[in-house]
Amino acid sequence: MSGRFIVFEGIDGSGKTTQLKLLAERFRSEGKKVYMTAEPTDMPSGKALREALGGRVKKSEWDMALMFVSDRIEHNINAEFGIKKKLDEDYYVICDRYYYSTLAYQGYSTDYAWVKGMNLDCPEIIRPDICIYLDLLPSQSLERISAGRDNVEIYENEDTLRRVREKFLSVIEDIGVRDNIRRIDAYRTIEEIADDVYSVVCECFEE
Ligand code: ADP
């Protein structure tokens, strides 16, 4: 495989989608082939997950952990759109969320070691070259999310965001070195963050 595999993680509203697109544009302008992707996927396995995440289908957290792994394996090995195929074709694959999210959510709602083993020890789940963790405090994230809406229902979620952020930080503590996870302060202007992301990613590829 000669492509590169970059993952963006962070709590909701941390700017993943924004930064992923900017990095993709920058690489494209340099003539690189870029493939943007996300989890859950748009494949049937990902659609089933979205149904469950939306509460339309009731699943246990253990089932959810399995469904994420199943979707992730398909995401890696799919003959047409799989990450492995894209990396073989020299693409820069940039992915919005990956197993770090499963570790942060299901890892703590089920059994962390079990979830970690399924993801990290699975030969069909490729380890990214770098993971960018966009770090934002829950209050900062809510400020941003609510700026785009005219109600404050979202404030009910501050506790949830705080818990999720703490879990992400524990995941970084656990596998940050192994997985080359870089924590970036996401409470800055879009351009400042984009420049930082670009230099951190390029530096990693020069090593
Ligand atoms: P995520 O994909 O992590 O949920 P988004 O990229 O969708 O985050 O960003 C959430 C909201 O915050 C969007 O309305 C976006 O335009 C805005 N936003 C993103 N980055 C910044 C930033 N650095 N400063 C201010 N607002 C931002």
Image (cartoon, grey):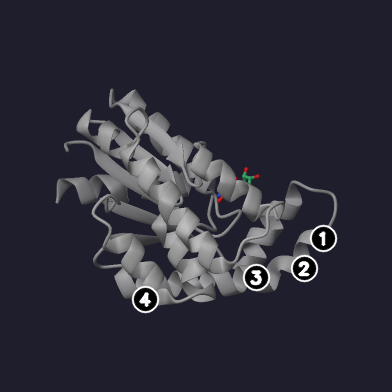
**Which amino acid type is shown beneath numbered disc 4?**
Ala
Residue that appears at 47% across and 55% down: 68
Q: Position of residue 136 (x, y in %)?
A: 54, 63
Mark closer to the chain start, 2 or 4: 4
**Which amino acid type is shown beneath numbered disc 3?**
Thr
Q: Could you tell me if the residues under marks 2 and 1 are in contact, i.e. CB atoms within 8 Å?
A: yes
**Of the pair 152 and 59, the residue shown nearer to us:** 59
* Numbered mark located on residue 160 in the image: 3
Mark closer to the chain start, 1 or 4: 4
Looking at this rendering, what residue extends furthest in the left direction? 207
Q: Secondary structure at mark 4?
A: helix
Q: Which residue is mark 4?
A: 113
The answer to whether the residue bearing label 2 lies less than 8 angstroms from the nearest atom of ligand 1 is: no
Q: Secondary structure at mark 1?
A: helix
Front position among marks 1 and 4: 4
The answer to whether the residue bearing label 1 lies less than 8 angstroms from the nearest atom of ligand 1 is: no
Q: Which residue is mark 1?
A: 153
**Of the pair 35 and 72, the residue shown nearer to us:** 72
Q: Is residue 193 above or below residue 137?
A: above
Q: Position of residue 89 (x, y in %)?
A: 23, 28
Q: CA distance from mark 2 to mark 3?
A: 8 Å
Q: Secondary structure at mark 3?
A: helix
**Of the pair 31 and 110, the residue shown nearer to us:** 110
Find residue 77 and report its image quarter. Answer: top left
Q: Which residue is mark 2?
A: 156
Q: Is residue 189 above or below residue 143?
A: above
